[in-house]
Image (cartoon, grey):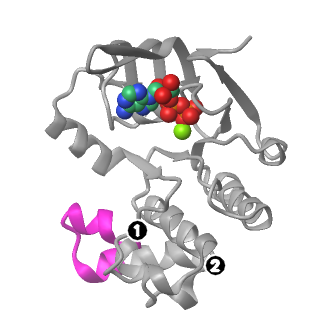
Amino acid sequence: MKPVLQVKDLTKVYKVDAIETPALRGVSLEVHPGEFTALAGPSGSGKSTLLHLMGGLDKPSSGEVWLGGRRIDGLSKTQLSDLRLWNVGFVFQAYNLIPVLTALENAAFVLELRGEAKEAREGKALQALETLGMKDFAHRRPNQLSGGQQQRVAVARALAAQPKIILADEPTANLDSKTGLALIEHMRQLNHQQGITFLFSTHDPRLLERVDRIVRLEDGQIAA
Ligand code: ADP
Ligand code: MG
């Protein structure tokens, strides 16, 4: 089967003033359709950098990124934002919901950017919220929701857009362990029932018991 996402010999060096920080040193990885994979590794090992490069949020220093059979590392900023709009769902550690919008409007936001009509996008968004157990909270704004509920809305927003893959950068880092586990169970169910491919980073060992596959990063490289 063709991978959904593939990186080849990826490197990333951040340059701040004259100081260079090598964040990734030759990472190769394939993610196949339907996989539920955790990216593990200590703080500073390159997890966020790798997820950002895979999702087209940033560009590598060298190497290749392939999304659904298309090479994306050389695309322009505009092409990348268009690509993200249609192909990738991203869930951030800090939820990143829009404060003035309701849960429903947040979940429908990507579809609105795509130009979908209000009724169609809200139908899909409501369905995604229902899947995450958040339908009853559809008309609340983020500050009227707990952290765990906000993160479920963020997953619903990614889900509503039906992306090829959902990338999540430490989605449970700001949640207590029970709420974090519940979020991972929701993601796991989406994976089983709808075949959604997930790649998420974590350094919580309890979450690692729930996945099919663990990719460990150490110092910018995949650990043996
Ligand atoms: P993780 O997510 O595993 O904690 P990161 O990908 O955030 O790791 O960071 C990997 C390395 O790159 C670290 O040494 C970090 O300090 C550095 N780094 C990350 N982002 C930047 C940035 N925007 N500018 C400079 N250095 C960065
Ligand atoms: Mg990180």
Whether 115 is among the magenta residues is yes
Residue that appears at 80% across and 47% down:
210
The residue carrying mark 2 is 133
Residue that appears at 42% across and 17% down:
21
**Residue 134 in picture, x, y percent from top left:** 58, 80
**Residue 109 in picture, x, y percent from top left:** 31, 69
Q: In which quarter of the image is residue 146?
A: bottom right
Instruction: Looking at the picture, tell me which residue is in the foreground, 116 or 157.
Output: 157
Q: Is 2 left, or right, of 190 in this rendering?
A: left
Q: Is residue 203 above or below residue 59?
A: below
| Callout 2 secondary element | loop
Residue that appears at 46% across and 82% down:
143
Q: In which quarter of the image is residue 105?
A: bottom left
Residue 154's tag is: none
Q: Does the residue labelled 2 lie within 8 Å of ligand 2?
A: no
**Residue 201 in picture, x, y percent from top left:** 62, 40
Q: What stretch is highlighted in magenta?
A: 107-122
Q: In this view, does 208 lie above or below 186?
A: above
| Callout 1 secondary element | loop
The residue carrying mark 1 is 97
